[in-house]
Image (cartoon, rainbow, N blue to C red):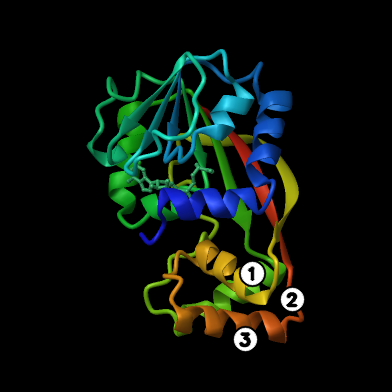
Amino acid sequence: MKLTPESLDAFKRACTENEDIAEIMRTHALNWLEAPVADIGAGRGDIALRAFPTLECVLIDRLDFAQFPIATPHRRLRRDVFEATVGDLGHPRTLLMSHVLQYLDDDEDALRALLARVNAAKLLVASNINVGVLGRLIRWSTPVFPDTNPEVDVPLIDERYDCVRTWQFTTSIHAGGRTELASRALHLLDVQTTRENIDLASHFLADEGLERSLTFNQEVRAYERR
Ligand SMILES: C[S@@+](CC[C@H](N)C(=O)[O-])C[C@H]1O[C@@H](n2cnc3c(N)ncnc32)[C@H](O)[C@@H]1O
């Protein structure tokens, strides 16, 4: 994983995706979800802070995001989620997984085992939809960057859950110019932002006629355990 708390913060500041995700959850899912919540790969923790600041929530992440504010009933846990016990996660009734499945799907059995162990009643999942320019970026990047880990749309691989609602929205990531936009595109691909990689991504963006913004589709899904 090439992501750092600083690179994640820079990416999130260049778009409104977390505000949009939090608004969808606050408006449509607040009365549906059940506390306590565990936010898996919470990053800054800002989605939970905006969406459900009064609910009990464990913000688990293997990186150190202590510098970012959290709501009073929320608490951070710095740990690899695969090493966390259900007690560590606060015996959650709802799991929030926003833009994190791409990091959790290397070992599908381990992900299944985690979901089975936690046995949450409800899941909220946010991920990109890889159509349009994002789909082309991912297809282009796979042979170019051997260690790419793009946010492909991971099926939830747990047949015990039914998807009961979806909400779609569009995100635009903004930049001052093509070089900066290229480094944002590399973040989406989880590729190191070296000079050489930025040049390669800049060429892709130039071919697409993109210089200052990149727009892609996203989806929030709500799941219930049968
Ligand atoms: C793309 S960020 C998304 C952050 C946040 N959910 C959001 O939407 O803003 C993915 C986060 O998952 C965390 N992560 C990845 N694998 C993890 C694991 N096995 N255990 C805990 N955190 C993990 C990363 O450190 C990173 O902060």
Is the residue 163 above or below the residue 127 in the image? above
Q: Is residue 151 left or right of residue 90?
A: right
Determine crowd level at label 2: few under 14, some 14-19, many 20+ residues with C-alpha closer than 10 A. some
Q: Amino acid at mark 1?
A: Leu
- The image quadrant where one finds ligand 1 is top left
10 Å crowding of disc 3: few (<14), some (14-19), many (20+): some
Dot 1, how many residues are within 10 Å of its Cα: few (below 14), some (14-19), or many (20+)?
A: many
Three-letter code for the amino acid on which mark 2 is drawn: Leu
Q: Residue 82, located in which quarter of the rendered image?
A: top left
- Residue depicted at 57% across the width and 79% down the height: 201
Q: Which mark is residue 203?
A: 3
State the image coordinates of residue 93 (x, y, percent, origin top left): 45, 19
Would residue 155 be seen by someone viewing this image from the given angle?
A: no
Q: Residue at x 40, y 38 (%)?
A: 65
Q: Earlier in the sequence, mark 1 or mark 2?
A: 1
Mark 3 CB in 8 Å range of ligand 1?
A: no
* Amino acid residing under circle 3: His
Is the CB of the residue bearing disc 2 within 8 angstroms of ligand 1?
no
Numbered circle sitting on residue 181:
1
The reply to whether dot 1 and dot 2 touch (C-beta < 8 Å) is yes
Residue denoted by label 2: 210
Sequence order check, earlier mark of 2 and 3 = 3
Determine which of the numbered discs, if any, sits on residue 168 in the image: none
Cα–Cα span, label 3 and label 1: 11 Å
